Amino acid sequence: MHVPPLDDHGHNCCFSLRRFFTSNSPSPCIANQTCSTSDVVNRSVKRLDSDVKDIIVCLTILEPQCLLTTLSPRQQAGYDDIPISFESCCDFSSPTTHTSDPPPTYFGSPPRFVAKYDFMTTIVTTIDTIDSALRSLSLSIHDHPELMFEEHHAHDVLADFMESHGFVVTRHYLGLQTAWRAEFTHGKGGRTIGVNSEMDALPLIGHACGHNLIAVSGVGIAIAIKSALLAHNVAGKVVLLGTPGEEGGGGKITLLERGGYNGMHACLMCHPSAGSLNSLSTGSCLAMQPIDVEFFGHSAHAGNAPWEGANALDAAFLAYSNISVLRQQIKPDHRVTGIIQGCKGGANVIPDYAQMHWILRAPDRDQLHRLRERVEACFKGAVIASGCRLKVAAGKPYHELRQNGVLGRYFSQTMSSCFGMDAQQDPFGASTDFGNVSYDMPSLHPAFAIPTQPRGGNHTPAFAVSARSIEAHQVCMTLTKGLAWTGFLVLADDTFYAEVKDEYERTLGALGAR
C-alpha cells in the first residue's frame, strides 16, 4: 500500500483511532471539502460515556484534509462540531467491522490523563529521522557479540553515539568497565525518566536474545524524549543507562546497589521475543536465582584402589538425579535447570572435583526462597551419599518483574490504537534483572514479538538470525515510539505521574503485607 509522505522528511505518522469514537453518520468525511491543517490540529474531543469519563484527547491530524461529518442536533449540542468518528489514511490494525461499541479496554478503565498528540508527532519524527543510524548501530552490535561484562565494542559505539547527539556521557560507569550513562537535562526542576540499553550476547549463539535491539531502542527512546523536551519546553531529565551482564550477571542489580538509578521517577525498556506477529505483552516474568555448586572428593586409582577415593563426579550426578526427581513435586510454574561442568581428568582416576551451575525460577521472590531450600537439600543428600564436601555460592537473585499498571495501560492502549498492535498481559517464563529495578521505582518492560522461524524462539541460533532482520528492527522502532511517548508523559503530565506513583506505592504496600 502506498502512503504519500506527510512532511518534508517523507515521514508518515498515521494513527488508527477509529475505535476511539462512535458516530451515527455513514461517512467520516464529506467529499471535496478542504481546509488547512491548523483547522483540525489539536481539536479537543471530550467523551462522557459511562465507561470512559473525563478523558480529553487532543488530536494532531497530519494530513491537510477536512474531517467533517454530519451531526444530529443532539451531537451538535454535545460536541460542538467536532468529528466524532475518525479513520486515518492508513490502518495498522487487523480488519474489523465498524460498530457502535465502545473501544476495547485492555487493562480495566483507562487512566485520566491528557494525551497530547503534538508531542507524539515530535517523537515519531525524531525516531524516523535517526532510524537508519539506529539500524546501523544495531547491526554493529549484533555482528560483534560480546559476553556479559565484556561488551567493550558495544560500550564504545553506544557511548559515542549518545555523545554525538548532545548527551553528557559517563563511560565505565560506577566501576563497571562496560557500563555507561548518558543524560540530558532541559530547564530547571522537573522529573527524571530512566531508560535501559542492554548489550550482552550469549555463549556460542551470539545475540540470540536480541539485545542489539534493546540497545538501540533505549537510544531511540532517550533521543526522542530529548527532542520533545526541547520542542515543547518541558523541564526534565532523561537518563539512559548502558547495562551490562543481563544474562546471569545482574548488571542492573550492581548499578542499583551503587546508586546508578538514584533520582529516577520511572524507568523503561523493552525486550524482543517470539510470538504472534504485531503483538506485545506487559505481563510479568519469573524471579530467578543462579547457584554455583562445587563438590570436593578424593582422588584414587580407579582400578587398583577405588575404595580409597571419594567421587566428586558421582556427587554431581546424584545431585542432578535428586533434582530430577524433585521436579515431579514442584509447581508447574517453578523451574530448575542446571549443567555439570568443571570435571577434567582420566577415566582411570577417581574424580576429586566437579562443578555445577543451576538456575532456579519461581513466580515471586518468596516462592523462589522456598524452592531454593528444597534444591539445596538435594545437594546435601548427594554429599551424604558420596562422602564428598560441598560449597554453594548463590549469585544475585533476580526479582519478578512488577509492571506498573498505569504505565502499562497507557502504553498498551496507545500501541493498540495508534499502531494496531495486539496488547496482552501474558506472563513469561524468562527472568530479568530489571525486575529488581521494578521493585525500586515505577517501571515498564514490555516484550514484543519479532518474526521467527518455527522453534526459533529466544536463546536459539535461529533467534539470533531473526534479531538481525529488518522486520525485527521495524517492530522495535514501533515499540520505541510508544515507550518514548510514555516516558515523556511521565515528565510532562503531573496528574499522570501522580497516578503512576500511587499505583507503585499501592502495589509496594501489598507486597509488604504478604
Image (cartoon, helix red, strand yellow):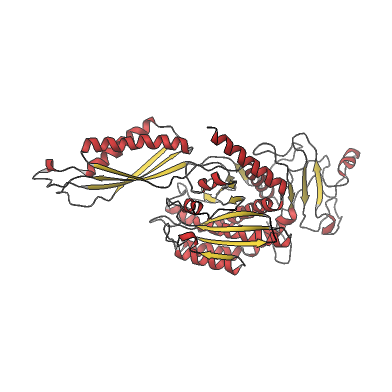
Quadrant placement of the N terminus: bottom right
Relative to 256, 477 lies left or right = right
Relative to 133, is 463 above or below? above
Q: Position of residue 101 (x, y in %)?
A: 74, 36
Q: Position of residue 374 (x, y in %)?
A: 36, 34
Q: Position of residue 3 (x, y in %)?
A: 71, 58
Can the viewer see residue 333? no
Residue at 34%, 37% (x, y): give it: 376
Relative to 456, 93 lies left or right = right
Residue at 20%, 47% (x, y): give it: 352
Residue at 69%, 37% (x, y): give it: 109
Instruction: State the residue in front, 134 or 498.
Output: 498
Residue closest to the far top = 329
Instruction: State the residue in front, 246 or 508.
Output: 508
Relative to 367, 1 lies left or right = right
Q: How many marks?
A: 0
Relative to 24, 489 lies left or right = left
Instruction: State the residue in front, 379 or 346.
Output: 379
Can the viewer see residue 419? yes
Instruction: State the residue in front, 497 or 274.
Output: 497
Q: Quadrant of residue 194?
A: bottom right
Q: Position of residue 431 (x, y in %)?
A: 47, 45
Q: Quadrant of residue 49?
A: top right
